[in-house]
Amino acid sequence: MAMPQMYKTKNIYYINMISFWALIEKEIKRFYRYWPQTLLPPTITTLLYFIVFGSFLGKHLPNISGVGYMQFITPGLIMMAVIYNAYLNVASSLFAAKFQNYIEEILITPLSSDLLLLAFVFGGVARGLSVALLSGAVAVFYAHITIHSIWLTLLASILISTLFSLAGFINGLIAKNYESVNIMLAFVLTPLSFLGGVFYSSAMLPEKWHWITYFNPIFYLVNAFRYAMIGVSDVPVDSTFIVSIILILIMYVVARLLMRHGIGMKQ
Amino acid sequence: MESALCIQNLCKQYKNGTVALNDVSMNVNVGDFFALLGPNGAGKSTLINTIAFLSKQTAGCINVYGFDQERQKNKVKSLIGLVPQEFNFNILENPFEIVVNQARFYGIRKSVAKKRAEALLKELDLWGKRSVMAMSLSGGMKRRLMIARALVHQPTLLLLDEPTAGVDIEIRKSMWNFLREKNLEGMTIILTTHYLEEAETLCNKVAIINKGKILVCDEMQKLLINHQDKKLIIDLQMPLPISPEIEGCRFNFISDLVYEVEILQGYELGALLAQFDRHKINIKAVRNLNNRLETLFLEHVTKGKEYGYATDV
């Protein structure tokens, strides 16, 4: 049997591109197929936050940074939904692929490790953006928000979902069971989100808590998103985007190092 | 003859110290149907996984169709099709999706992938199940789905790790026919199996591996001829009045129409059959008491243990 013609004529970049889009498509289909489990719950949760914290409690709270409480918490709430969904999408998808061994389908093909990682991240970003869009629609409808900069909002959403997709990928790689996929969510992401200024401004905190807040990466992401959506931020907006990009680069390097050593992928 | 797979001094040691492959060297020629036999835990799957990039070797090198597995990995990956031992597809996807996606992972355009998937699923009698979730397929269907998936990018070297495990005899035989056809078309196939009859029927070459070491590697017929069983079962056309006494063999009664015949040292089967004819013993069928490959397999695996040329695992 002669060598298949395609491998004589097609170069590896062409093969990688088709393979890359195939994996992205597979990842996106995966969460769209189960939209009642993947897209609907975060939208309802965000809506409930709006009703309880925004409407019921918000009426009795003073303005923060010159905006109403409902407007103030909206970016944080959307961002929390984006973080959880981008993270969970990649972590659970990768872990399921490892658990059921169908990651091997991909590992035996010429798809490069970088593109494999990026395809999973794209899947997470797609889910993050889908959730942002749905939650944003609820916010516009319910909280009557006028978006400060649509492009900055899009950029912030992409950066945040990229960062947490990478975090999900790392967790998916090192996770030994389904519990460990959720441990990071429950014990790291949720506390950092709640302490990252979603529901309050850092100016409201006592002086010593400021420093602690500044070490919380989610604080910068919340502020980046808040500035993009309503034009208000506790810290200079440049720094928020710079921190996001630095964190993305760190996460990417960690993920690649783990993959290079075959951790969680190869025997 | 052109080499499809050349393995030299391959070693694999896991982090816990287990030696899974110990200085394995072997060669598989283009067009071979190669059986890789060994007891459970012998290193068969590790060897297959190492060839297919699912496990990384500690030392040694692998060449596939002249391409170095380490330095030309994309070429090598494109040439290999793998049917692993365990089911490894997404059970929430349907067979058509699984095969099309796999083709696209190898860089095949969607339109071409769909045509190929259709042809393969039809060939393997899975077309009727193309839209159901893979989890609802029977064991035999799942095995065939993995074969379809492994062939969709038209590999030249197919690695089959126990492809018929747990499959009923009817489906197994249809899978044999399918694989035999592929081999006749020129595809090189490496098969690991615990069904020695399967290996004997399909393969022209065999290697026996135990505790990570290749114990024997040669042409199937050459090995089997040297292991001609000395005990035969003969089926008679009519019962014999008394147990016959023929020089060179010993008859053991099993039933009126079935005798076990032990061929004594220095006598040939042809001469004995001529004697049967002279004694008016009408024979319907002659078969070996034991499967020859089974005898060969057990002999080598046992010898390996006795002489200790297998390393401690």
Image (cartoon, coloured by chain):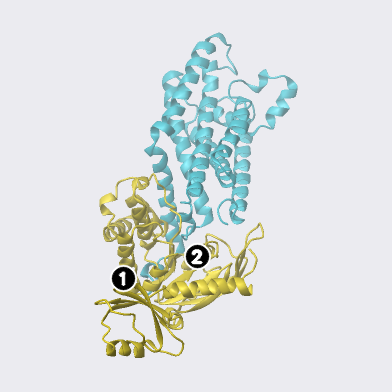
Front-lying residue, B64 or B48: B48
- Chain A colour as displayed: cyan
What is the quadrant of the C terminus of chain B in the image?
bottom right
The kind of residue on which mark 1 rests is: Glu
Residue A74, x across and y down, in percent:
51, 23
User: What residue do we see at 43% from left, 83% from top?
Assistant: B225
Q: Which chain is yellow?
A: B
Circles 1 and 2 on the same subunit: yes
User: What residue do we see at 63% from left, 38% from top?
Assistant: A243
Instruction: Tell me if B107 is positioned left or right of B45 in this view.
Output: left
Q: What's the chain of the residue with tag 2?
A: B
Furthest toward the right, the residue is: A208
Q: Secondary structure at mark 1?
A: helix
Evaluate whether residue B54 shows in this view.
Answer: yes
Front-lying residue, B163 or A7: B163
Q: What's the chain of the residue with tag 1?
A: B
Residue B163, x across and y down, in percent:
40, 61
Within 10 Å of disc 2 (Cα), the crowding (few <14, some 14-19, many 20+) is many
Front-lying residue, B176 or A57: B176
**Residue assigned mark 2:** B48
**Residue assigned mark 1:** B181
How many discs mark residues in the rendered view? 2
Instruction: Tell me if B33 is positioned left or right of B115 in this view.
Output: right
